[in-house]
Image: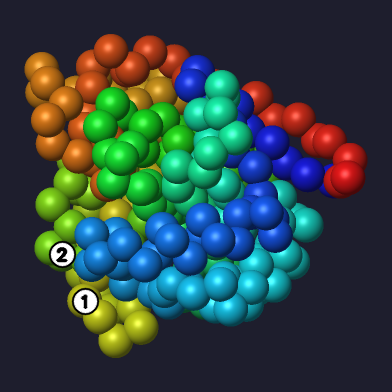
Amino acid sequence: MTTVLLSKRLLLRPIAAEHREAIAALHADPRVAAQLVDGIPDTPGKADLFLRWNAPMAARGHGTFAVHRRDSAELIGLFSLTPFDGDEDALELGGKLFPSAWRGGLAVEAAAALIDHAFGTLDRARLVSAFHPDHRSAPASLARLGFAWERDGTLFGRPVRIMRLTRDGWIAQGCRPLRSRRRDSRSDDGGGGPDARYAKPMMAMTAEQPDE
């Protein structure tokens, strides 16, 4: 069974062999790689290993999802729900977009779809997100999604800042991103500048479809 998530503009589905080249190209972009704290599958061979690592999680409804615009088959990024540093009670929300998709609020929209999935279908009570301290846009984007600072730490030997979101907190803010205080979208939000036009409810729709 394949988990497919839909938002207003995006379709998210588990990564598959067809995404192999795009996965490598995304991680080979130095503007993307500079923001990452985990492994970087920046060659087709490493992408194959990444796909095999992800398969057991995808079978359980989480792991890494390919992000597409609903009207296009082109992969524009990857967003994920993965186990966090040995913490069995939490999933880590992560994401990255090709720089061409860094404006328009797409990162916040993709993240909101996964948050709905985590707290709804997967019945999780808490999410965390860890990012490099130099990632300029991550804190504001995560704050729009309701995440609050938890602590500083290290992952894979690199410094990170960790923010958290509870299911109760997501429900309290209406299961949607908060309206941005910015009036423009010139900054990127880890893939897309905060944009108040898309601060409307974005409930993810989950469909279980048979694998082909």
Which residue is more in the foreground, 3 or 170? 3
87 lies left or right of 133: right
Residue 193 found in image quarter: top left
Residue at 51% x, 29% y is 69
The part of the image, by quadrant, that contains residue 199 is top left
* Left or right placement of residue 71 versus residue 61 in this view: left
Q: Residue 67 placed where, x, y %?
A: 52, 41
Mark 1 Cα within 10 Å, few/some/many (few <14, many 20+)?
some
**Location of residue 104 with respect to 100 vertically, above or below:** above
The correct choice, above or below, for 142 with respect to 179 in the image is: below
Q: Can you name the residue that lies furthest to the bottom here? A: 157
The residue singled out by tag 1 in the image is: 159
Q: Measuring from the top left, give residue 190's x and y in whole percent.
A: 27, 47
Q: Residue at x 28, y 13 (%)?
A: 197
Instruction: Specify whether 184 is left or right of 175.
Output: left
Whole-angstrom CA distance, mark 1 to mark 2, is 7 Å
Q: Residue at x 67, y 54 (%)?
A: 18
Query: Mark 1 vs mark 2: which is more N-terminal?
Result: 2
Q: Which amino acid, by three-letter code, is at mark 2?
A: Pro
The quarter of the image holding the C terminus is: top right
Q: Looking at the image, which is closer to me, 166 or 53?
A: 53
Q: Residue at x 36, y 48 (%)?
A: 98
Q: Is residue 74 above or below residue 31?
A: above
Q: Which mark is residue 133?
A: 2
Task: Specify the amino acid type for callout 1.
Answer: Pro
Instruction: Look at the numbered disc 2 and give the secondary structure of its residue.
Output: loop
Whether 52 is drawn above or below 31: the answer is below
Other residues around mark 2 within 10 Å, as few (<14) / some (14–19) / many (≥20): some
- Residue 85 seen in the figure: yes
